[in-house]
Amino acid sequence: MWKEYQKNKTIELRNLLIIENMGLVRSIANKVKMNYHLSYDLEDLIAYGVFGLIAAIERYNPTFKIKFSSYASARIKGSIFDELRKIDWVPRTVRNKIRNVKKEISFEEKGTYLEEYYIAKKHGLSLIDYHVMTGNHFVSLTLMENQL
């Protein structure tokens, strides 16, 4: 089918290739959801992945002797993350702070006791922001104001 698509890049052939590779998209979307503990709907992640699959189909060259699934996997995963970044209203710096605090909390749970205040102070946070990051509060305007 790839040789046919290389000759005649018709929408019908492209759609057949999309259908043929939907299992790959589903698999990657499921792994992304599980590995990153995302609260997004799996069907949304699959839809984002289809954008990457289409781009991979249009740019794939079978003469490179690379399996299509290997080539497409990176594009599908990248497309999912690109779309998630577009709809995320939280700045990356805040996400990084959250990730660092969570790492420290998991370290605390492994036996080393660190006061909440110490963790918050170490990361330049108020106790309110610390509690927001740990899921004890819903919204923190001060955390967002510090990023502006």
Image (tube, rainbow, N blue to C red):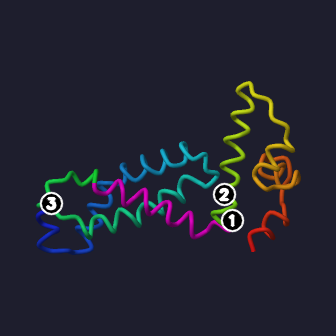
- Asked whether 79 falls inside the magenta stretch, the response is yes
**Between disc 2 and disc 1, whose residue precedes?**
1
> What element does badge 2 sit on?
helix
Badge count: 3
Which marked residue is nearer to the observer: mark 2 or mark 3? 2
- Locate residue 39, reporting x and y percent: 64, 51
Real-space Cα distance between discs 2 and 3?
A: 39 Å
> What element does badge 3 sit on?
helix
Is residue 107 rendered to the left or right of residue 26? right
Indicate the quadrant where residue 41 lies: bottom right
* Dominant SS type (magenta): helix
Q: Tell me which amino acid carries mark 1.
A: Val
Quadrant assignment for the C terminus: bottom right
Is residue 143 rendered to the left or right of residue 99? right
Nearest the camera: 117 or 11?
Answer: 117
Q: Which residue is mark 3?
A: 62
Q: Residue at x 57, y 70 (%)?
A: 86
Magenta stretch, residue numbers: 71-89
Real-space Cα distance between discs 2 and 1?
A: 7 Å
Q: Which residue is mark 2?
A: 95
Q: Residue at x 49, y 46 (%)?
A: 30
Check whether the beta carbons of the residues at disc 2 and disc 1 lie within 8 A of each other.
yes
Q: Tell me which amino acid carries mark 2.
A: Arg
Real-space Cα distance between discs 1 and 3?
A: 40 Å
Q: Which residue is mark 1?
A: 90
Nearest the camera: 118 or 106?
Answer: 118
Q: Residue at x 74, y 69 (%)?
A: 147
Q: Tell me which amino acid carries mark 3.
A: Pro
Nearest the camera: 17 or 35?
Answer: 35
